[in-house]
Amino acid sequence: MSVQTTDTVLDRILATKRDEITAYRTGLDTARLADEIAAADTPRGFAAALAAKSPRAVIAEIKKASPSKGLIREDFDVAWLAERYAAGGAACLSVLTDRDYFQGDNDFLAQARNACDLPVLRKDFMIDPIQIDQSRALGADCILLIAAALSTDLMAELAGRARELGMDVLAEVHTRDELDRVLALPNDTILGINNRDLKTFKTTLATSFALREHVAPTRLLVSESGIFTHEDMTRLATADFGAFLIGESFMRQPDPAAALRALLGTPD
Ligand SMILES: O=C(O)c1ccccc1NCC(=O)[C@H](O)[C@H](O)COP(=O)(O)O
């Protein structure tokens, strides 16, 4: 009897990422990478920037396309988007660098960071310590760890390397089990609850509300994905979420600064 397995999109993304890492390691000049890390701009404090703008801290995402929505924004000038997000009052930026599934690019990170003073999250699928070094060399201030993609030990190793390099860590969970594993990481880990189920792509803010109950009220929490309106943000803020990671909602508006102000409820 044959055993049937159904690959999820996350499985496919991770398989592609493993191939990418193999290719990257094959051509890698480790001395050059070390030089690039040494020459990279000092990390901007991502967690500190969130804390400073909490309880309405927005991580504004630069996201051209996604596996669930296809092309989101055709007119895509990374530096202009970063500048508009900064003008609109974002606390931090998130930049998708994955090429195959999000039409991102590693170069987008420096383009965004050089256009403003905000700290920047490298939004990608981290599964190997070499990606953490690469992220710092690219100028990242924070890296993302997706609990659904990582064992607890590997998560701790990647988080440890990021902290050694001076970057902050955003660890993202979608289930109670993932939350318990992330809560075992050091307390300076930024905790994100992703409203998107990475297997089905469905988003519901109910995920944030349900998992929030299992985290100390004093801890800064980020609610991620599927946030579209001022009312969404207000409901989450009432449940003590202090930060919000938002992409599609802003990317679909002509001016991301105006979209961000409308979501924050701040006048022009
Ligand atoms: O956005 C997707 O379709 C997606 C699919 C598979 C893995 C990750 C995915 N998104 C990454 C994100 O976490 C979001 O870009 C981010 O939270 C912003 O979400 P949204 O505001 O809904 O664009």
Image (tube, rainbow, N blue to C red):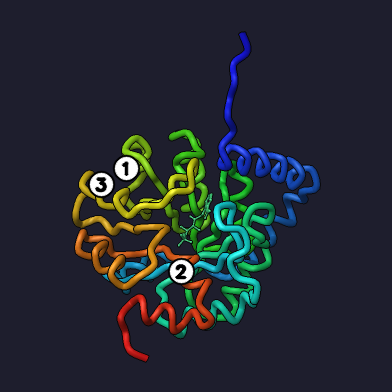
Q: Position of residue 208 (x, y in %)?
A: 30, 52
| Residue at (42% x, 49% y) in the render | 172
Element type at mark 2: helix
Q: Earlier in the sequence, mark 2 or mark 3?
A: 3
**Circles 2 and 3: CB atoms closer than 8 Å:** no
| Residue at (64% x, 53% y) in the render | 101
Q: Which residue is mark 2?
A: 249
Q: Earlier in the sequence, mark 2 or mark 1?
A: 1
The residue nearer to you, when weighing 145 against 164, is: 145
Q: Is mark 2 within 8 Å of ligand 1?
A: yes
Q: Amino acid at mark 2?
A: Ser
Q: Earlier in the sequence, mark 3 or mark 1?
A: 1
Q: Can see residue 37?
A: no
Q: Position of residue 239 (x, y in %)?
A: 21, 59
Q: Measure the alpha-carbon separation of dots 3 and 1.
A: 16 Å
Asked whether, in this view, residue 109 is left or right of residue 27, the answer is left
Q: Which residue is mark 3?
A: 210
**Circles 2 and 1: CB atoms closer than 8 Å:** no
Q: Amino acid at mark 1?
A: Leu
Q: Can see residue 203?
A: yes
Mark 2, Cα crowd under 10 Å, few <14 / some 14-19 / many 20+, is some
**Circles 3 and 1: CB atoms closer than 8 Å:** no
| Residue at (57% x, 65% y) in the render | 63
Q: Is mark 1 within 8 Å of ligand 1?
A: no
Q: Amino acid at mark 3?
A: Ala
Q: Measure the alpha-carbon separation of dots 2 and 1.
A: 29 Å
Mark 3 or mark 1: which is in front?
3
* Quarter occupied by the C terminus: bottom left
Q: With respect to residue 235, does 176 lie above or below?
A: above
Q: What's the mark number on residue 268? A: none
